[in-house]
């Protein structure tokens, strides 16, 4: 675990850039892994299908690129904040899973979503706003061992990735789609 975990000083001083990726394949315990993989399973299949519809044969490779690149991108703010922090470590795939979830939120904004332990469902776009707000707040104010910054930036990256890839690799306009879906929800 010590060789794979996201440890910013090892990246800064020993150029162990691989840690941006490898930390996404290790988890603190079985519940951490189970929760991430459950969310990935629940949303990954839908995003893979959406990507196949939007991008055709490029859909599956782009889905894989979204996931792998989000492992790196979601940790960049954490890296810059902790480049010389010898007591900081992070692990897990939560930021990458957030990217997949938020690609789904952007593509299916009116789909009802809920949390496992709370039986209330919200449209995905409301869930997304709440999730981003809580993640932003906790990334600044929490003293827990959870990297809320990775959750926030992974979510943002999932949307940005979708917008950029759609712009250059398809005729689909995800921004217009999102706006039309949300405005249709209120009619």
Image (tube, grey):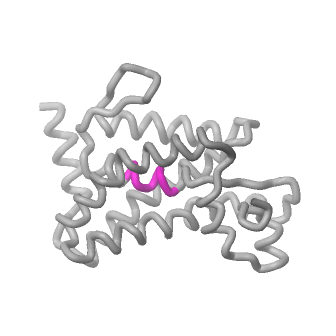
Q: Is residue 87 left or right of residue 5?
A: right
Is residue 46 one of those drawn in magenta? no
Of residues 153 and 58, the one drawn nearer to the viewer in this rendering:
58
Residue lying farthest to the top in this orientation: 119
Is residue 99 one of those drawn in magenta? yes
Residue stretch in magenta: 96-102
Quarter of the image for the N terminus: give it: bottom right
Q: Is residue 157 left or right of residue 93?
A: left
Quarter of the image for the C terminus: give it: top left
Query: Which image quarter: residue 56?
Result: bottom left
Residue 75 in the image, given as x and y percentages of width and height: 62, 61
Vertical side of 10 occupied by 149: above or below: above
Of residues 11 and 160, the one drawn nearer to the viewer in this rendering:
11
Vertical side of 74 occupied by 171: above or below: below
Vertical side of 170 occupied by 131: above or below: above
Q: Is residue 122 left or right of residue 55?
A: right
Of residues 28 and 99, the one drawn nearer to the viewer in this rendering:
28
């Amino acid at each position: 675990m010590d060789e794979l975990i996201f440890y910013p000083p090892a990246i800064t001083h020993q150029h162990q850039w691989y840690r941006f990726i490898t930390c996404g394949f290790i988890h603190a315990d079985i519940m951490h892994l189970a929760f991430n993989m459950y969310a990935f399973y629940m949303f990954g299949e839908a995003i893979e299908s959406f990507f196949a519809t939007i991008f055709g044969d490029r859909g599956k490779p782009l889905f894989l690129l979204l996931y792998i690149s989000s492992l790196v991108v979601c940790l960049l703010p954490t890296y810059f904040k902790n480049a010389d922090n010898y007591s900081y470590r992070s692990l897990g795939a939560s930021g990458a899973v957030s990217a997949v979830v938020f690609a789904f939120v952007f593509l299916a904004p009116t789909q009802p979503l809920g949390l496992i332990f709370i039986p209330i469902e919200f449209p995905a776009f409301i869930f997304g706003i709440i999730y981003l707000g809580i993640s932003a707040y906790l990334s600044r104010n929490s003293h827990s061992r959870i990297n809320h910054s990775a959750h926030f930036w992974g979510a943002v990256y999932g949307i940005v990735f979708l917008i950029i890839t759609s712009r250059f690799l398809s005729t689909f306009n995800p921004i217009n789609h999102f706006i039309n879906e949300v405005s249709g929800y209120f009619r």
